[in-house]
Image: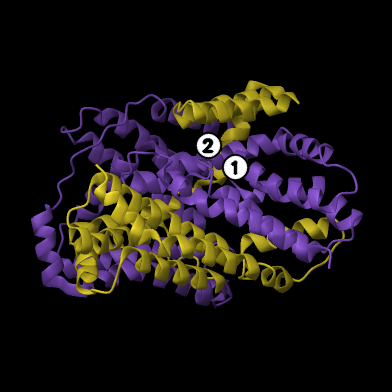
Amino acid sequence: MLTLLGIAVLVVGFIARINPFLVIAAAALTTGLAGGLDVVAIISLFGKAFNENRYVSVVWLVVAAIGLLEREGLQERARLLMANITYATTGRLLLLYLLLRQIASALGLTSLGGHPQMVRPLIAPMAESAAEVRHGQLPDHTRYMIRAYAAATDNVGLFFGEDIFIAIASILLIKGVLEQNGIFVEPLQLSLWAIPTAIAAALVHGFRLVRFDAKIANSVKQP
Amino acid sequence: MITLEHVYILAGLFFAALSVLSARDTANAKRWGNTAFWTLVAVSFLFGSYLGDFLNGLLVIALIGVGGSNVLGRGAPKTTDTATREHFAKARGNKLFIPALLIPAIALLGGVVLKDVAIAGVPLFQPRQATLISLALGAMAATGLALFWFRAPLLAPLQEARRIMDTVGWAALLPQMLASLGAVFAASGVGVVIGDLMGAVIPAGNQFAAVVAFCVGMAFFTILMGNAFAAFPVMAAAIGLPLIVQGYGGSPVVMGAIGMLAGFCGTLMTPMAANFNVVPAALLQLPDRDGVIKAQIPTALPLLVINIILMYVFVFR
């Protein structure tokens, strides 16, 4: 039971909005000590894991290209594009992006999207611009809400599309866990059973996006 | 052969450049904080493979010290103003999109087509790392094309990168930090304890209760760990396999597939999944760190209920 102290530290730290780096350090120390490790072992364990997980931060290499393109007018171009498509609304645009992101992820094309590559330079500015065409200059709270929905749509599309692809890490993990227990399954069976939830995700999030334009109209009216 | 180590060297040089440019930016009152932070990250990428576990651990402590003490500021890299950008956007038209789309195009080409290519028996990419290597290649190709096409100053990609990274700040390293914390949790046996607890609270003989406990447990444990991958082995061992599959004769395929997706509902609701939820809030300059999570909860909760129903209906057929 003592090993759960680290999780308590983590939850309290996040809720109290203490800097996450400090919370993580405290949680690692608490958990390690409760689990019977000494301080040197905890430092080594954390250092080893940090080093092995460097690939997680490699994605930041793309901001050189994205930043350069922003300097050269990319976000403004994305806005202009939306201003010219009169039937485009924020809700419809995000709905289209949701479906495209889901289908592409289901085909294993998970790299067609992502927050630094797609949402910040293209999707969020387009979504804001579509709302500006209707409502003029947006109040800040509306602008932030549209951005948050753009990021959320990317996540939902990715999470509930990728599992339909047979070679994705999560499918291979399920297969591996079952195999350790003497149950042998084909990845294809697993990916087929991801389809009902994928459809449900498209319906639930899609329904919210269909109503999003009305939500924006309401939000604009509020001070 | 191009390996992940090559990508790390590239990333190390990139972070070192951020550090040097930060040091020279007198407009940023906290520039030495930024310099120290990016220098430490650069050291990790350039030399992490040679430092050994303990020195890497000390490096992380230093990084936590700098990142956790509010000494990072925002620089003022030279960039274009809105009027110039609007002019560029009109003059250049849609060809501005081409370098941006080159990044995923090359990532796909490498990750799908070139991943098994070998030249004279030597594979082009390190096995299983084709996607990451291709992403780095794509980023470089897009930068090169945009530099050449739009005749931007040579330092512009690095200055613009610094502009974005300064808005993200220490949160840029948060996903990697959390992944490392997960390793400490795993080594200390946190998963086993939680699994035992969850397994103990389910009423015996109730199939529906087992399904609810399994799916909610997947979401809950994912919220705590930030990752459904960490939750699945624990919950499968605690409830999924012993109760749903072996106890009530449920399908392991349905249990596994839908259980993982129930976990993904948890991913949508936790700041622990920093790369999906916290980093975009910083990238999009939202004032509320949890803004993206708040936009996702009304999708995640109904979807969790639907997953429970789907599993209950199909797992015992």
Q: Looking at the picture, how far across and down is residue B90, in whole percent?
A: 12, 69
Write down which chain is painted purple: B
Which residue matches tag 2?
B51
- Determine which quarter of the picture holds residue B201: top right
- Tell me whether circle 1 and circle 2 mark residues in contact (CB < 8 Å): no
Pointer 2 local density, CA inside 10 Å: few below 14, some 14–19, many at least 20: some
Q: How many marks?
A: 2
- Is residue A59 among what the camera can see? yes
Which amino acid, mark 2? Leu
Q: Looking at the picture, how far across and down is residue B297, in whole percent?
A: 51, 48
Between B70 and A58, the one nearer to me in the picture: B70
Chain at numbered mark 2? B
Chain A's shade in the image?
A: yellow
- Is residue B59 among what the camera can see? no
- Does dot 1 land on a helix, a strand or a loop? helix
Give the answer, above or below, for where B24 lies relative to A209: above
The residue at 24%/34% (across/down) is B23
Q: Looking at the picture, how far across and down is residue B246, in whole percent?
A: 90, 56
Which residue matches tag 1?
B223
Pointer 1 local density, CA inside 10 Å: few below 14, some 14–19, many at least 20: many
- Does dot 2 land on a helix, a strand or a loop? helix
Left or right placement of residue A5 versus residue B126 in this view: right
